[in-house]
Image (cartoon, rainbow, N blue to C red):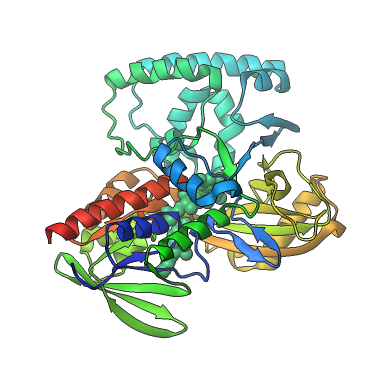
């Protein structure tokens, strides 16, 4: 076996799991992370005695192996958790996923009747007529009918994502938007009927399709505690971890990665490797190869886009502020806000809470660079909404995630396939995770992806 380590790029959930699995297989491992802490999107930030999460994370999985693994690592520190979600709309708060009684009771009767007619129309049409080009708009119309689609989703998606649902591949709605619960059965029938005629070339994501099922879990320090335990276990198993170390480029020799260029505190070095597991954004990683992976990979890398999020964290002098753990708004600078008091987090000092507001944006938007602007926009919206008084805000912090959400724009499947094929074609490289496979998945799926990539890489290296 080569003495050079497998370099795992990124210490989020996928990288941490990949590192542990590779050690279990006896491979030397170097885990490299740009930030000064592990966990990536699920890692959060500790300031004083408080843990700010990037859009608070709850752990859930129906995978018995992943659940057993996390339970054995966390012991009593894994706490079960009840999530509540509300959407403010037309002056009313709706539960999410939308429920029929809520829609019937809270929308004006005329709107309910129009919504029912429109659902029936789109349901029948969806079963009989194959759209010339399926996109997220046509799919959501079939899920909800045009009236509910326009009321709840059209403008909201445009605001959060910066592009309309019609510019999204159907995979976006399919993977991300839950359906009206009692209409699920009817919709499945419609989809089955539709499938008889459809020749839609959907991305095959079996095995990694996100399902929000099973019990929800958290810890008193949020998801970051799970990530820290995963990292401690990887180290215990013999992995090496380098924090505050950025991957700059990868040296390619034919179909093989020979070395990884790292930067730490301004100093650069090239580390020889026996292989890599990438968990960085697949398009950015593809651009890092020297010599390059070729024009097709370059063009594919340019075709994939991520949506960024600025997280505004507010320390509030009150034990609890929001009426639900997650609240969604359409008309404010932020689309979602969370009150960490609902998660049972330890607060410092007691009697205070943390709110985290998510402002979706592009890195070219002013709100990405201007922290004061982001904080002011969020605080003034919360004051206007009657949620808090300015005087209650004890402190504010701004965190950024450049690769928060992969954007399933129309045709992204082709570009993604090109990049995944390029990685698969390398004899000692694999790619994994939400960024590394450009898939809108939660932590447990990112973990599974990390394990699977480690297994595939182990087979590749054994063959070499
Ligand atoms: C707002 C929001 C809320 C979410 N809520 C939940 C939830 O409640 N429950 C849930 O299960 N999932 C949730 N998710 C999804 C979850 O965050 C991800 O599925 C998971 O964290 C992805 O892990 P990963 O390792 O694939 O990627 P990441 O966490 O993005 O890890 C990639 C790592 O690579 C590092 N990196 C990047 N570039 C470099 C470089 N050049 N050199 C070195 N290191 C680099 C990054 O710093 C990062 O640590 C949420 C996601 C978002 C955006």
Image: 420 above or below 213: below
Q: Is residue 339 left or right of residue 445?
A: right
Q: Could you tell me which residue is drawn at 34 percent across and 51 percent down?
A: 451
Q: Is residue 293 left or right of residue 359?
A: left
Q: Could you tell me which residue is drawn at 41 percent across and 49 percent down?
A: 446
Q: Position of residue 394 (x, y in %)?
A: 81, 62
Q: Position of residue 316 (x, y in %)?
A: 79, 56
Q: Could you tell me which residue is drawn at 41 percent across and 44 percent down?
A: 445
Q: Position of residue 74 (x, y in %)?
A: 54, 50
Q: How many marks?
A: 0
Determine if residue 388 is in view: yes
Closer to us: 438 or 344: 344
Determine if residue 162 is in view: no
Image: 300 above or below 100: below
Check the picture and name the quadrant holding the N terminus: bottom left
Check the picture and name the quadrant holding the C terminus: bottom left
Closer to us: 461 or 1: 1
Q: Could you tell me which residue is drawn at 52 percent across and 24 percent down?
A: 144
Q: Position of residue 416 (x, y in %)?
A: 30, 50
Closer to us: 302 or 350: 350
Q: Is residue 353 left or right of residue 74?
A: right
């Amino acid at each position: 076996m080569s003495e050079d380590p497998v370099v795992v790029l990124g210490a989020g959930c996928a990288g941490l799991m990949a590192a542990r699995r590779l050690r279990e297989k006896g491979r030397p491992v170097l885990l490299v992370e740009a930030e000064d802490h592990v966990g990536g999107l699920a890692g959060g930030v500790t300031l004083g005695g408080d843990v700010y999460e990037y859009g608070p994370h709850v752990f859930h999985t129906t995978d018995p192996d992943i659940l057993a693994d996390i339970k054995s690592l966390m012991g009593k520190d894994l706490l079960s958790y009840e999530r509540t979600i509300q959407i403010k709309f037309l002056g009313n708060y709706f539960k999410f996923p939308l429920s029929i009684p809520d829609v019937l009771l809270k929308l004006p009767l005329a709107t309910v009747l129009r919504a029912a007619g429109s659902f029936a129309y789109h349901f029948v049409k969806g079963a009989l007529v194959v759209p010339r080009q399926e996109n997220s708009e046509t799919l959501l119309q079939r899920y909800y009918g045009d009236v509910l689609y326009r009321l709840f989703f059209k403008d909201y998606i445009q605001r959060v994502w910066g592009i309309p649902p019609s510019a999204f591949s159907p995979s976006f709605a399919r993977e991300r938007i839950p359906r009206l619960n009692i209409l699920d059965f009817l919709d499945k029938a419609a989809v089955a009927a539709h499938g008889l005629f459809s020749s839609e070339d959907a991305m095959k994501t079996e095995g990694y399709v996100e399902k929000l099922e099973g019990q929800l879990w958290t810890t008193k320090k949020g998801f970051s505690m799970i990530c820290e335990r995963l990292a401690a276990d990887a180290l215990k198993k013999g992995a090496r971890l380098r924090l505050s170390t950025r991957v700059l480029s990868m040296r390619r020799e034919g179909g093989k990665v020979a070395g990884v260029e790292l930067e730490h505190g301004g100093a650069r070095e090239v580390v020889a490797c026996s292989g890599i597991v990438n968990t960085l954004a697949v398009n950015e990683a593809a651009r890092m190869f020297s010599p390059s992976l070729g024009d097709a990979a370059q063009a594919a890398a340019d075709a994939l886009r991520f949506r960024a999020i600025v997280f505004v964290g507010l320390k509030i002098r009150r034990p609890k502020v929001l009426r639900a753990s997650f609240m969604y708004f359409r008309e404010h600078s932020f689309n979602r806000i969370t009150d960490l008091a609902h998660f049972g987090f330890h607060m410092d000092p007691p009697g205070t809470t943390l709110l985290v507001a998510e402002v979706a944006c592009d890195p070219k938007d002013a709100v990405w660079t201007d922290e004061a602007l982001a904080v002011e926009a969020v605080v003034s919206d919360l004051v206007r909404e009657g949620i808090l008084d300015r005087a209650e805000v004890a402190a504010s912090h701004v965190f950024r995630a450049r690769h928060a959400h992969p954007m399933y724009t129309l045709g992204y499947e082709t570009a993604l396939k090109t990049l995944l094929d390029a990685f698969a074609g390398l004899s000692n490289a694999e790619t994994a995770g939400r960024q590394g496979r450009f898939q809108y998945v939660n932590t447990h799926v990112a973990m599974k992806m990390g394990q699977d990539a480690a297994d595939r890489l182990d087979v590749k290296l054994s063959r070499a």
